Amino acid sequence: MSIVMNMFWSGLTASEYDRVDRGVGWREDVPPGGRYHIAWFTGDGGRIVDVWDSQEHFETFVQARLTPGVQKVGVAGEPEVAIWPLYDLQIEGDPPPGCVVSDGTSGGMPEDLYQRLERSIDWKGNPPPGAVLHIAALDGDTIRDVGVWRSSEAIDAFMTGPLTDAAVELGVDEEFEDEPTYDLHAWFDPTKTATQAAAKVKAST
């Protein structure tokens, strides 16, 4: 069963992440079962979301390669990790420079509401302008999702336009809170060729 791995590492810096990235070499030597990887940083640490073919694939990678790489760099502390079944994965191309991450993993949305909104908006058949990646996981009966967008403006346009309109049409008595957004630090799509997979996107400053 495909899974979503959601990691928060308190105090992790972008420099430490990059050193682990180079040391582990997951771009050049793709770990079996790895399907997608994005990373970004908040004021209190690093956040990483992966999609894997199974939890066993992820755990094998952690034990054989990630843990030794982290120890070599000397990253302090231990990450908080949650594993959820993959619910939805939509990729609309490679993230260009300057993309942002919309993090909806902490709040979530009831599964039935997610389904109703998805059918109404049809974001698979008609992707919102500026959308690059959408990862959704099922945590009990709650959907937790992460999106990569070309800009914060694209997110705002979707939230205040199609999403709000669909909610009104469905008679949903719920206000959608703005999800926090952060600069995308890195992404990795193992399904690409070796040259493409080695690419890294860093937000423009």
Image (cartoon, rainbow, N blue to C red):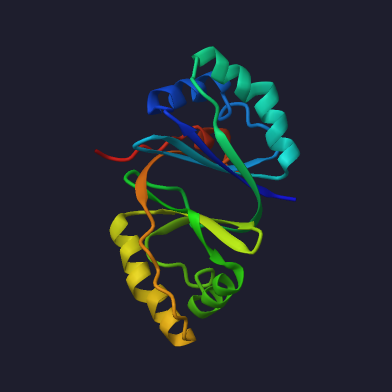
Q: Residue furthest left?
A: 205
Residue, x 46% and y 20% (percent of image)?
A: 19
Q: Position of residue 40 (x, y in %)?
A: 42, 39
When the figure is inspected, residue 12 is found, relative to residue 1, above or below; the finding is: above
Q: Quadrant of residue 64?
A: top right
Give the x, y percent position of residue 63: 69, 24
Q: Can residue 134 be spotted in the picture?
A: no
Is 104 left, or right, of 97 in this rendering? right
Q: Position of residue 84 (x, y in %)?
A: 65, 50
- Who's the residue at 46% across and 48% down the image? 94
Q: Residue 90 at what x, y percent from top left? A: 55, 59
Judge from the rendering whether residue 108 lies leftward or rightward of residue 95; answer left or right. right
Q: For the point 58% across and 28% down, which residue is it?
A: 26
Q: Which quadrant of the figure contains the C terminus?
A: top left
Q: Image check: 64 left or right of 50?
A: right
Quarter of the figure with residue 58: top right
Give the total number of marks visible in the rendering: 0
Q: Which residue lies at the image location 57% right of the left edge and 18% below the top edge?
A: 69
The answer, for residue 195, to whether it is visible in the render is yes
Relative height, residue 33 to residue 170 (above, below)? above
Work out whether residue 44 or residue 124 is closer to the camera in this orientation and state it: 44
